[in-house]
Amino acid sequence: MAKKLKVGDTIRGYRILKVFGPGMMAISYAAQAPDGRKVFFKQYKSPAPTVVWYRDFVAYQKELAARVVRGKADNFAVGHVDSFEEVWGGRCYFQAFQFVENGADLQQVLDKERESHRAIGKAPTSNPVIWARHATWAKVLVAGVGALHDVKIVHADLKPANAYLIEDPTIAAEFQLKLIDMDFSLLADRRPPWHGHQGYVGTDNYRSPEHLTKGGVPGLASDIFTCGLILYELLAGRHPYWSEDQSDYARLVHGYTAEPPALLGEMPWPASNGDVSAALHRCLNPDPAKRPTAAELRAILSGRNRKPAAAAPTAPAPKPSAPLPRPAAPAAAPAAAVPTARPPITSEAVQLRGADGATLQLRIRTELGKRLVRQFGADGDFWDEGQCVLERGAGGQWFVRPGAAATNQTLLNGRALTTPRPLRAGDQIAVGNEVKNIAKLPLTVLPA
């Protein structure tokens, strides 16, 4: 019988640095590889070399590792380093994987966010910075799942704890994503060797209907189901089926009791909250054929599913008999959000109008900063150089884009701007702080 490794033990050139503890299928360690790098090292308890499907399992693992490095899957999945059979008190199978650190898994990150916001009685996603981060993570998660599906790999155990976020301050999302714990993932086009010998891996409250059905085999659509549960947590702030009783969880899953979620923020344009909510609900359909594919889900989250005509309808000419109301005085609280039913501005030029009636007309891409906006009043000094950019897109509509290095927030209708947004007649651009309800030098945007 194989025995457990200890700190300081060396096997096939791998020196054990730390014992993480036994799991259901394997004992996990941190180890130093023969080339000096740190790796995640696994010693398998199951399958043991004596079981009939052991050799097929080893071959299956090699094919999984080979597929990960094809295409984009290698960008999202933890890399396979080595695998071998060795005697350590008895014959045993070992694998080494890329070691991920300098971050935390998504479950830990979400728990930390909830704890930090519990004291103020608000959901983390009520913070516009956290909401923007969650919207980005949702798209990256689906991109990672899609990359696996492109090479016919089913993760089969998606959950927040298996999505590791590596800190990276050089990118907007602040983290890179790595999907972990894939040694019992499945090849969608090849039945796993353990079929009929043992069940499929899965985690309480994150099993798909296929996991829960006797004789069922998780497939690509099963990942979409479990991914949908995570997206509910990221974008709606809740797990739709969580239960301490897993028989109750199974009843909820098979009964399709979830409602289309109300998102806790506005998806970055051109994505539509309505489209995203409907897609997340489809992810949880008990019929796998009715769930979206990863590619479809990714398109909906980014807004690529929307036709240009629907995303940017032509603006009607303004009627002289119905002039737009003048904006509030600068000292007032930020203006209430303007209804989004109005179409984006598609005129040849836009006009900025200050509270005193002064105007500035723009026909080309223009970077707004303190030197340009001082003509509207002394509060222009609160604006940074490069506070935001106004530009006309390929479809003819005008956008406002926040400056990356601005000290104060760029506000659009009183909301902090984190991504480019289309402009609509009557929108107000200001500088300040959304949380503190501060808005300096609001400028009203009109078609010119």
Image (cartoon, grey):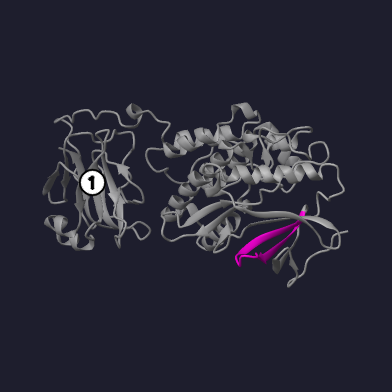
Q: In which quadrant of the rendered view does residue 194 lie?
A: top right
Report the number of numbered marks: 1
Magenta segment, principal secondary structure? strand
Q: Name which residue lies at 56% across and 36% down.
A: 150
**Horizontal placement of 31 versus 415: left or right?**
right
- Nearest the viewer among 63 and 432 is 63
Magenta-highlighted residues: 26-44
The image quadrant that residue 309 belongs to is top left
Three-letter amino acid code at disc 1?
A: Leu
SS state under label 1: strand
Query: What residue is rendered at 20% in x and 57% in y?
Result: 369
Q: Nearer the viewer, residue 161 or 414?
A: 161
Note whether residue 215 is visible: yes
Figure quadrant of the C terminus: top left
Residue at image mark 1: 390
Task: Estimate how packed mark 1 is, as few (under 14), some (14 to 19) or many (20 or more) residues with alpha carbons within 10 Å.
Answer: many
Residue 123: tell me if it is visible.
no
Which residue occupies the foreground of this view, 301 or 447? 301
Q: Is 161 included in the stretch rendered in magenta?
A: no
Residue 313 x, y percent position in the rendering: 29, 29
Give the vertical position of 345 relative to 372 (above or below): above
- Residue sitting at 65 percent across and 65 percent down? 34
Give the image location of residue 174, x and y in percent. Answer: 45, 57
Residue 38 among magenta residues: yes
* Quadrant assignment for the N terminus: bottom right
Drawn side of residue 169 relative to residue 59, left or right: left
Give left or right: position of 69 versus 59.
left
Which quarter of the figure has residue 15?
A: bottom right
Residue 63, given in percent of the width and then of the height, sits at 67, 42
